[in-house]
Image (tube, grey):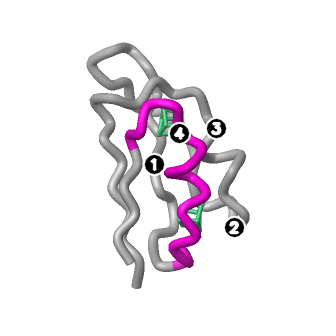
Amino acid sequence: MPKITIDEAVCKGCGLCANACPLHIIALDGGRLNAKGYHPARLAHPEKCVGCSSCATMCPDTAITVEK
Ligand code: SF4
Ligand code: SF4
């Protein structure tokens, strides 16, 4: 199963990864703030990820790592 790691300290909560995911399994965590004051992206359903890397490619801050 692919493994996605999101570096929350780097994330600026732009939501581009959530829009890029074809399975819509990434969302901004509205209940938490990171040290920069942004709602960080969170993988809501890691078991559904197909490892396409669209989220990582889209992230302007390279906060997402995909391991296949
Ligand atoms: S690798 Fe693909 S399926 Fe997995 S979270 Fe990223 S965009 Fe979604
Ligand atoms: S695209 Fe990158 S910076 Fe933007 S919300 Fe996703 S992980 Fe955070």
Q: Establish if 38 lies above or below 46.
A: above
**Within the magenta stretch, is there residue 7?**
no
Of tags 3 and 1, which is closer to the observer? 3
Q: In this figure, which residue is indicated by the disc labeled 4?
A: 59
Q: In this figure, which residue is indicated by the disc labeled 3?
A: 16
Q: In this figure, which residue is indicated by the disc labeled 2?
A: 23
Which callout, 3 or 1, points at the residue further toward the start of the chain? 3
Q: Are marks 3 and 4 in contact (CB under 8 Å)?
A: yes
The span from disc 3 to disc 1 (Cα, nearest Å) is: 12 Å
Residue 23, given in percent of the width and then of the height, sits at 69, 67
Which callout, 3 or 4, points at the residue further toward the start of the chain? 3
> Main SS type for the magenta part?
loop
Q: Establish if 25 lies above or below 55.
A: below
Q: Are marks 1 and 4 in contact (CB under 8 Å)?
A: no
Q: In this figure, which residue is indicated by the disc labeled 1?
A: 42
Crowding at mark 2 (Cα within 10 Å: few <14, some 14-19, many 20+): few
Callout 2: CB less than 8 Å from ligand 1 = yes
Point out the stretch of residues depicted in magenta.
48-63
Which callout, 2 or 4, points at the residue further toward the start of the chain? 2
